[in-house]
Amino acid sequence: MTGLLAGLDGNRLLRHVLGAVLITFLMTSLIVGLELVATQTGLSLRPRYHIVLYCVVVVALGSTAVFALAERSWRLPMLVGVVIAALLLVPLLTGNLASDLAFLLPFPVAPLNWLALLLPAFILIRAAQLAYASARPPAAAARRREMTRTGKLVSLGLGLLLILVAFAFPISPWGSRQLVDILTIVLIYIMLGWGLNIVVGLAGLLDLGYVAFYAVGAYSYALLSEYFGWSFWVCLPLAGLFAASFGIVLGFPVLRLRGDYLAIVTLGFGEIIRVVLINWYEFTGGPDGIGGIPRPSFFGLPFQANPPRDGGETFASFFGLSFDPYHRIAFLYYLILVLALFTNWFTIRIRKLPIGRAWEALREDEIACRALGLNPTNVKLAAFGIGAMFAGFAGSFFAARQGFISPESFVFIESAVILAIVVLGGLGSQLGIVFSAAILIGLPEFFRELEDYRMLAFGLVMVLIMIWKPTGLVSHRDPTIRLHPRGDGR
Amino acid sequence: MTPLLTVEHLTMRFGGLVAVDDVSFTAEQSQITSIIGPNGAGKTTMFNCLTGFYQPTTGQLTLAGERGDFLLERLDGHRIVRDAGVARTFQNIRLFTGMSVLENLMVAQHTEQMKASGWSIKGLLGLPSYRRAEEEAVHLARSWLDRINLTEKADWPAGALAYGDQRRLEIARAMCTKPVLLCLDEPAAGLNHTESHELNDLLRWIKEIHGIGILLIEHDMSVVMGISDKIVVLDYGKKIAEGTPAEIRDDPRVIKAYLGEPEEEDLPDIVAEDLDLDPGAR
């Protein structure tokens, strides 16, 4: 052991590792170290020392590895890496992960075990990255600049591939009803993320009440169809319009505020909308919500088993298919996909227009903007209004998909999740938002098995992303206009 | 001929503190008017009044340029730039550091570009009229980049430029708003000899080629004495002298403001040495 640690400052290493171990011990002993069990006399707490011990050992090894790598001593982390790889590989090859690792992985559910396995590997990769960066700073920096050029092509190709896969997915053999449903939800959040990205990522206005505009969109469609019987296709643009006007009306008084103050006011606005929806019982149905919202039709062809009473055809009978509820689910999926892609196209395009540049300039320096003759109020209002409009579109789709909405769906945590998607994706990055929405919305759906631990995993993922990529998953910014074509070395 | 800018009885109070006290002067077209004075004399405060960042307590600021006559104290900050055509730079450089050099110059042309893009509608549709307008804007930006030798670095983030380049870029950015009056707040601060020489050339070139008025706050006397047509000296918010560089150099009130009461007979030598009021010395 001493040979492996040669050249390292023993005291600092010890302090580093002990600190990490202590924190891990304190956190795990309270969170996973105690189990509630029912005994004959009632409930009692049973300590689970082995889990705490396991966590402590993993963290001790991991933090040693990080420290050693950071000090550029390679041998110990290599050893740790080999041990972990062996532990991972042997059971994978024999194909019996759960029973072979039962002694090491004591958690009752599979995803948690997987997490416990992946965590050390994750720490190791991160440590290697740190060590590499510290060992060869100039070379690494040059490489990074090179990477952004190819990285741009990669992300473009990746984007196209994702779009193709997204279009092909429901008709592919993997397109099950459950998966398409989950993806529809993910797509709603991607669209919301792209919309909020205009406000937060481009214009730099921290909006904590974005879900209010989502609610305005949803209730616009629900109420218009309930009171006037208007169809989804008429209400969709109207919902966007209403949400945008709400955005502008809210914007007028609050946009002279900055940063934290703006965040608080938008947070308050989000709550006001929700409270109004709850209390205006005669109009919105209050906490009972609105049910029986009509589903969108396919150019007038409804998705239902029997033809409408007033004659006419259904989607299935028109195309000579037998009725299948999957048709409607796939149709809703395609609808939100097109809406989301429209949002994406719009954002990419407007970023390269004067107003988009003005947003980014405003984010960088408002005073300089004023000194260049930009009217900050108008620029901010445009960002607020357009961002709200996309939330309105997404909201009316949400109402049409659910068929039932209530104020329950528009609580603050939704705003927080959308904001987290934008921030984790890398402010201003379109592709990053897709990834972070998939991680933050998709993974919890897949990990339903974890039950209450889901939020723990959610938090862990956020913390890990912030450690690994403090500026978001995709943080590269490309100029909106170039004088020299890319790749000529300038 | 009416002067380009007429400042009459400008006073700016912050509570009990009088930062600018009843200052009047004029600035002409195609001339460089410098404002000098010890630290805290109220130079930047006066700039902030002129460019709409502060609302003056009293006084009248008249601008009579190509775009018509304006009373600056009655306009909103952004309209002073957009309508009246007064551009400014800042003492601590305020570039959009995360955006590219070219983008900085494009943002400066926002007002025209916004109209050309049909408030973004024509731009979203990609109509040729907008694309032409954008090309023109790039052309203007390019000509400025050529002038300040930053064409090669046009796609760099502005924050990655060297300090002197950032200073020049900020001036170019202000010029891209096509102003009639350019206000520069200590443009030579932090520049070395070569760079401040280049700055002198640039400012003289702007004055001659573009024929606009330049208002300059500066501490670097080699710049002030070398290029000014007229100098206004402030001390404790009051104007204590006004005149050509030669007049100012010999003005006893100015010497007193900078060095205090004379105690020795050989004061003029000290002035020449410490203040470097003589441009020939550099």
Image: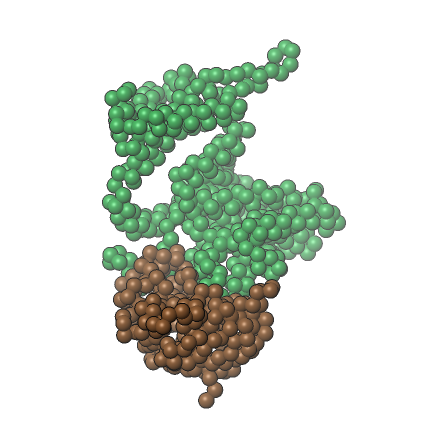
Chain colours: A green, B brown
Horizontal and vertical percent for residue A271?
Answer: 64, 47
**Residue shown at 45%/16% (left/top)?**
A50
Quarter of the image for the N terminus of chain A: give it. top left
**Tally of marks:** 0
Horizontal and vertical percent for residue B270?
Answer: 34, 69
Q: Judge by depth and name the residue closer to the eye, A130 or B250.
A: B250
Q: Judge by depth and name the residue closer to the eye, A135 or B107.
A: A135
Could you say which quadrant of the image residue B27 lies in? bottom left
In this image, A405 relative to A15: left or right?
Answer: right
In the current view of this chain or complex, which residue is farthest to the top? A40
Could you say which quadrant of the image residue A229 lies in? bottom right
Horizontal and vertical percent for residue B271?
Answer: 35, 71
In this image, A101 relative to A271: left or right?
Answer: left
**Residue shown at 42%/64% (left/top)?**
B91
Depicted A185 relative to depicted A111: above or below: below
Residue A158 shows in the view: yes
Q: Judge by depth and name the residue closer to the eye, B157 or A421.
A: B157
**Residue shown at 28%/38% (left/top)?**
A132
Quarter of the image for the C terminus of chain A: give it. bottom left
**Residue shown at 26%/30% (left/top)?**
A73
Depicted A390 relative to depicted B276: above or below: above
In the current view of this chain or complex, which residue is farthest to the right? A282
Depicted A67 relative to depicted A466: above or below: above
Q: Judge by depth and name the residue closer to the eye, A388 or A401.
A: A388
Residue A120 shows in the view: no
